[in-house]
Amino acid sequence: MASHRLIRRIVASTATSNLFSSLAYVLMPLVILRELGLGPAGLGVMLSIGSVGGLLGALATPRLAARIGEGPLLPLGLMVGGAGVVLFPLALAAGPGPVALVLLSVGEFAMSFGVIVYNVMQVSMRQRVCPRGSSAG
């Protein structure tokens, strides 16, 4: 499968996204709790709103794929997720308070929405383009 151009690109995009989101998620609670002082409730609110974004992304993906097309939806999902991540440093710049919580929550919603849309599309596309009888591992 390494020779398949589309799969190679999807693997590279997914690996890069996973690496940097993992780094961000390790640091995010420290920033929210220590630097912004939003407490466990603030962290919980942000993560809950992000989860709603993920659920809505999963529900919207079939309609978006039908309307926009599967190919364009892959990079669009990554861009929406990336745009959400941009709000995290803005929240840190805003400092402690409700503005930071709103920025974090909107960012987490967009990031979760975009990542779920991307993941649903990339897994579906990989399943379609992999030849029958090939192993995934």
Image (spheres, helix red, strand yellow):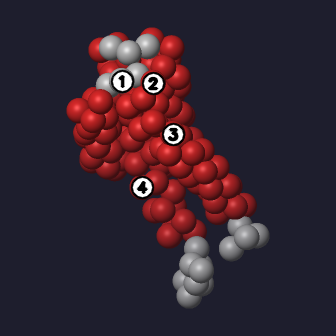
| Residue type of the residue flagged with mark 3 | Leu
Q: Tell me, yes or no, if residue 108 can be seen here.
A: yes
Q: At 31% across and 39% down in the image, what residue appears?
A: 47
Circle 2 packing at 10 Å, graded few (<14), some (14-19), many (20+), is few
Circle 1 packing at 10 Å, graded few (<14), some (14-19), many (20+), is some
Are the residues flagged by discs 2 and 1 in contact, CB closer than 8 Å?
yes
Q: Say above or below: 75 vs 92.
A: below
Q: Earlier in the sequence, mark 3 or mark 1?
A: 3
Residue underneath mark 2: 35
Q: Which quarter of the figure has residue 37?
A: top left
Horizontal arrangement in the rendering, residue 121 relative to residue 106 (left or right): right
Q: Say above or below: 94 vs 71.
A: above
Q: Earlier in the sequence, mark 2 or mark 4?
A: 2
Q: Secondary structure at mark 2?
A: helix
Q: Secondary structure at mark 1?
A: loop
Q: Nearer the viewer, mark 3 or mark 1?
A: 1
Residue underneath mark 1: 37
Depth check, front residue: 110 or 64: 110
Q: At 71% across and 67% down in the image, what residue appears?
A: 4
Q: Earlier in the sequence, mark 2 or mark 3?
A: 3
| Residue type of the residue flagged with mark 2 | Glu
Residue underneath mark 4: 120
Depth check, front residue: 120 or 30: 30
| Residue type of the residue flagged with mark 4 | Val
Residue underneath mark 3: 27
Separation of residues labelled 4 and 3 (CA atoms): 26 Å
Estimate the x, y position of residue 19 in percent, counting from the top left.
61, 51
Separation of residues labelled 2 and 3 (CA atoms): 11 Å
Q: Which disc, if any, is residue 11?
A: none
Estimate the x, y position of residue 96 in percent, counting from the top left.
38, 15
Q: Secondary structure at mark 3?
A: helix
Separation of residues labelled 4 and 1 (CA atoms): 35 Å
